[in-house]
């Protein structure tokens, strides 16, 4: 991504994250992927607000009557400081929140580890018995969970989509002002994400070991509830508060970025073309109101996803259905491989979404949704004849 994508993307003189798509493939194509991005991030932010709400209710031993107050508190507070701070405030708080997340996760890992016998051979035996430690599967089946190919292809495409096609990431690259700064931002973000994922995997294994050595008859069976239950029942109250703060930091970091990106997308792609007489000051003021509206809508949607499966499946499905086609369009754009008619791109995007929905409702694992939508859109959008986009087309906005 760093070598192939960033240089080509930042070489374009536009200021809008999807401006390069409008210049090379047409404004209707940009409007289409912007609409997909809006739907994607609204559902994604709703899932993010729902997850820490369950954590708070579990760790603080609150009844379900506190669900909406907790959702509103998280959602409204994230919305308010996004509206007041803008993109700069989001970037600064993201950096602070990433540190809080890592510190909190590290504390959980260490405290869980010191409460189990230090015997690596016994650990392997316990994890094997629980099914958490098995040999990597080379099966080509799309229905088998976490195969080698599912991780290498399915999850890799999802990660590429988050870096190359997500307007939130593209907006941050543009905000850095130079290739070197964008490169550093990308590498630091990649390193932070890798460390966070490694810590989460380690915590999952250690918590599994903890309950293998300390059986609990009332341990929840739902995967999303085991970690909150561990925090509530096995950790001291002070550390429990730190973990809740870390999870809230992760949520607010992502939600605020999503609000900012969605407000920019709605204002520039949908509202300003309709109200062409708006001044820059009026556009900025309108963008703040749109940010407020986006945050409130996402907060309300958070109460409607309780029965949609695990947080992982929800995120992979919502990401894949919409992000797969967006990734295909951005890849074709920056590769400069040629172009077809806007109508064909629009049909390809629609087909990619339908393929993603079909995979999501099939027995296939959710990690394949993004890759399926990407492949369908890319193949249908690929020009049948050779040739690249003429240089004058690259300068249009």
Image (cartoon, rainbow, N blue to C red):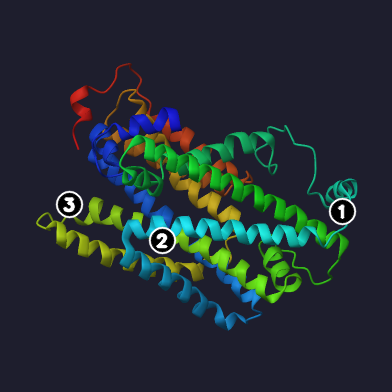
Placement of 323 over or under 210, stated as above or below:
above
Q: Position of residue 87 (x, y in %)?
A: 33, 56
Precedes in sequence: disc 1 or disc 3: 1
Residue at horizontal 47%, vertical 44%? 162
- The numbered dot on residue 256 is 2
Q: Position of residue 18 (x, y in %)?
A: 30, 42
Residue bearing the label numbered 1: 118
The Cα–Cα distance between marks 1 and 3, rounded to whole angstroms, is 63 Å
Give 215 or 120, whichever is nearer the viewer: 120
The Cα–Cα distance between marks 1 and 2, rounded to whole angstroms, is 41 Å
Secondary structure at numbered mark 1? loop
Precedes in sequence: disc 1 or disc 2: 1
Give 238 or 221, whichever is nearer the viewer: 238
Residue at horizontal 58%, vertical 40%? 155
- Depth-wise, is mark 1 or mark 3 nearer the camera? 1
Give 162 or 83, whichever is nearer the viewer: 83
Residue bearing the label numbered 3: 273
Precedes in sequence: disc 3 or disc 2: 2
Q: Position of residue 376 (x, y in %)?
A: 46, 34
How many neighbours does mark 3 have within 10 angstroms: few (below 14), some (14-19), or many (20 or more)?
few
Secondary structure at numbered mark 3? loop
Q: Residue furthest left?
A: 277
Task: Verify CB contact (< 8 Å) between mark 1 and mark 2.
Answer: no
Residue at horizontal 88%, vertical 57%? 117
């Amino acid at each position: 991504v760093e070598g192939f994508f960033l240089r080509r993307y930042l070489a374009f003189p536009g200021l809008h994250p999807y401006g390069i798509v409008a210049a090379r493939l047409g404004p209707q194509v940009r409007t289409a992927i912007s609409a997909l991005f809006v739907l994607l991030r609204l559902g994604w932010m709703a899932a993010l607000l729902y997850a820490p709400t369950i954590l708070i209710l579990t760790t603080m031993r609150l009844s379900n009557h506190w669900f909406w107050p907790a959702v509103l508190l998280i959602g409204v507070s994230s919305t308010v400081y996004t509206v007041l701070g803008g993109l700069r405030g989001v970037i600064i708080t993201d950096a602070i929140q990433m540190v809080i997340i890592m510190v909190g996760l590290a504390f959980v890992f260490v405290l869980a580890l010191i409460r189990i016998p230090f015997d690596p051979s016994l650990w392997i035996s316990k994890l094997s018995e629980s099914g958490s430690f098995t040999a990597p599967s080379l099966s080509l089946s799309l229905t088998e969970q976490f195969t080698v190919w599912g991780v290498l292809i399915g999850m890799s495409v999802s990660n590429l989509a988050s870096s190359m096609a997500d307007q939130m990431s593209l907006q941050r690259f543009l905000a850095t002002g130079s290739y070197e700064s964008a490169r550093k931002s990308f590498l630091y973000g990649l390193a932070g994400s890798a460390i966070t994922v490694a810590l989460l995997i380690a915590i999952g294994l250690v918590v599994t070991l903890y309950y293998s050595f300390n059986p609990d008859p009332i341990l929840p069976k739902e995967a999303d509830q085991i970690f909150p239950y561990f925090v509530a029942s096995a950790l001291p109250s002070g550390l429990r508060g730190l973990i809740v703060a870390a999870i809230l930091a992760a949520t607010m970091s992502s939600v605020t970025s999503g609000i900012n990106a969605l407000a920019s997308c709605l204002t520039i792609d949908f509202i300003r073309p309709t109200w062409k007489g708006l001044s820059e000051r009026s556009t900025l003021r309108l963008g703040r109101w749109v940010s407020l509206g986006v945050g409130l809508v996402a907060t309300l949607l958070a109460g409607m996803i309780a029965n949609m499966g695990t947080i992982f499946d929800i995120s992979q499905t919502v990401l894949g259905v919409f992000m797969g086609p967006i990734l295909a369009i951005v890849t074709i754009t920056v590769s400069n491989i040629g172009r077809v008619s806007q109508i064909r791109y629009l049909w390809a995007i629609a087909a990619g979404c339908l393929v993603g929905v079909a995979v999501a409702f099939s027995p296939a694992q959710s990690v394949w949704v993004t890759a399926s939508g990407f492949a369908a859109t890319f193949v249908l959008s690929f020009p049948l004849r050779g040739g690249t986009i003429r240089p004058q087309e690259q300068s249009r906005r």
